[in-house]
Image: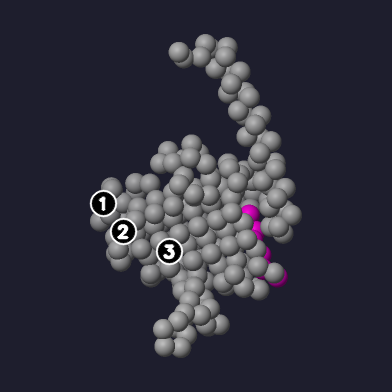
Amino acid sequence: MQPTGVLSRWLRSLNAVRRGMLNRLWLAEARARGLELGSGVIFTGRPYLKRFTNSRICLGDRVCLNSTLRSNPLGCSRPVSLVTTRSGAEIVLGPGVGLSSAAICAAKRVEIGTGTFVGADAMIFDNDFHSPLGEWHWGEAAPDNPKPVIIGRGVFIGARAIILKGVRIGERAIVGAGAVVSREVPAGHVAVGNPAQVLSPKNAPRASTEH
């Protein structure tokens, strides 16, 4: 049986109150972890936040992190995660940036410009995480391993895309769903495929904008 109009409105109001209370709770936790938060930041669900000593995670005004199943049309399979792994590392999200179940890991710097959207389950990292150690083992990444990732304003990054270390993406560029980007994407261009090919806007397929 479907709820009546009055009951439906009451349930929506109740859910809005609940979401607001949880948002305040997750924001308070983020501040306690040392994150820098602008005004109007929204956490839909609890993100995974891990800030290394003497590193920075900075969220500009109106940043939105979607970490719950219903907060994105494709569903969110995991919480948004923002992780710094070394002293001096920085994650900087500009005003109006939106992330849905995305993972960002910085050993040096990941910067995302104003109004950029990052689709469901995308990953962005500025390092290779591990380097060979001895004959068969793996150790921590070498000190010169990280290379900053800089993403411009108004970029769209599709679902399950991967942005690798050292990549720069220009303003209003588009990264297609599932693309693996290892080189620069100029402003206004489109990156699609694995490994990603960079296309001018007039040659870009419509499917590259799916999220």
Is the residue 146 above or below the residue 81 in the image? Answer: below
Front-most of residues 142 and 92 = 142
Numbered tag placed on residue 166 in the rendering:
none
**Closer to the camera, 206 or 91?**
91
Q: Earlier in the sequence, mark 1 or mark 3?
A: 3
Circle 2 or circle 3, nearest the eye: 3
Q: In terms of depth relative to the viewer, which is nearer, 163 or 6? A: 6
Q: Would you name the residue on which mark 3 appears?
A: 163
Q: Which residue is mark 1?
A: 205
In the visual, does 97 lie left or right of 2?
A: right
Q: What number of labels is visible?
A: 3
Q: CA distance from mark 1 to mark 2?
A: 9 Å
Under mark 1, the amino acid is Pro
Look at the picture and state if 58 lies above or below 115: below
Which residue range is magenta in the image?
A: 54-59
N-terminal of the pair, mark 2 or mark 3, is: 3
Image coords of residue 98 (percent x, y) = 53, 48
State the SS at label 3: strand
Instruction: Say which residue appears at 53% left-offset and 49% top-offset.
Output: 79
Residue found at x 55% / y 17%: 8
Pair 1/3: label in front: 3
Q: Quadrant of residue 187?
A: bottom left
Depth order, front residue of 60/8: 8
For the residues bearing labels 1 and 2, Cβ distance under 8 angstroms:
yes
Per the image, the residue denoted by label 2 is 192
Where residue 64 appears, x then y in whole percent?
A: 57, 46
Give whichever of discs 1 and 2 has the lower sequence position: 2
User: Is disc 1 placed on a helix, strand or loop?
Assistant: loop
Type of amino acid at the residue the image marks with label 2: Val
Q: In the rendered image, which quarter contains the N terminus?
A: top left
Disc number lying in front (1 or 2): 2
